[in-house]
Amino acid sequence: QSVLTQAPSASGTPGQRVTISCSGSSSNIGSNSVSWFQQLQGSAPKLLIYSNTQRPSGVPERFSASKSATSASLAISGLQSEDEADYYCGVWDDSQQGWVFGGGTKLTVL
Amino acid sequence: QVQLVQSGAEVKKPGASVKVSCKASGYTFTNYLMHWVRQAPGQGLEWMGLVNPSGGSTTYAQKFQARVTMTRDTSTSTVYMDLTNLRSEDTAVYYCTRALGIWGQGTLVTVSS
């Protein structure tokens, strides 16, 4: 079981807005900054969001994120077929003294 | 451009050790922590630990504490991850990643008798 909880799957149609959630605790999301990663099939993960809401250069504005208490969420607006991927949340955990990840959410674009 | 290039795939027998390398280029090697993350087939991401290229200090996930060693060679801008006493459950793709922002291409380690 992962320390962070994500729904295993999500789906949407092109152009739609989808949200992926990540639930944690006071020792991780509640006290540290959340990152989000996108992993396309057969590829290495890619940093999508850092410091809860910040996008690295090159990441489209369609990707946004937020954090509240011990939960975080990633929103993708204007869904495109190339957004079909696995999405992971990650954060430092003060109790485990290490990074922890969610189990991942597989996004399907219908 | 910033790049992390990892060593090639490995096949090991149970009980053996594996050493994966990750050569960095395109930036000042000592300015960023290097993490190792692994992914078993069809599974999620698992953080193993990190090494600070400036000084060599390490932090390991408790799960791997007894079996993993992460080192660095500043003369070649290379970090290494050594995992001992391999078991079948260690079969995975191992990634080095610069501060979780830049990722290597991954190294498949297969543990099989």
Image (spheres, coloured by chain):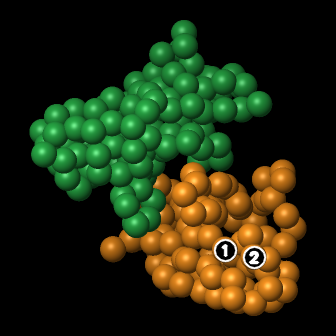
Chain colours: A orange, B green
Question: What residue did someone put label 2 on?
Answer: A81
Residue A22 visible in the picture: no
Mark 2: give few (<14), some (14-19) or many (20+) Cα within 10 Å: few
Residue A34 position by quadrant: bottom right
Mark sitting on residue A84:
1
Mark sitting on residue A71:
none
Q: Is residue B17 left or right of residue B8?
A: left
Dot 2: what SS? helix
Q: Chain of mark 2?
A: A
Q: Is residue B82 left or right of residue B8?
A: left
Tell me the quadrant of the picture where the N terminus of chain A can be found: bottom left
Identify the amino acid type marked 2.
Ser
Position in image of residue B4 (x %, y %): 60, 33
Residue B72 visible in the picture: yes
B69 over B77 or under it: above or below: below
Position in image of residue A18 (x %, y %): 72, 86
Mark 1: give few (<14), some (14-19) or many (20+) Cα within 10 Å: many
Dot 1: what SS? loop
Q: Chain of mark 1?
A: A
Outermost residue on the top side: it is B75
Identify the amino acid type marked 1.
Glu
Residue at (74% x, 70% y) in the render: A82
B62 over B44 or under it: above or below: above
Tags 1 and 2 touching, CB below 8 Å? yes
Residue at (57% x, 31% y) in the render: B5
- Out of B109 and B102, give the one closest to the viewer: B109
Position in image of residue B34 (x %, y %): 53, 36
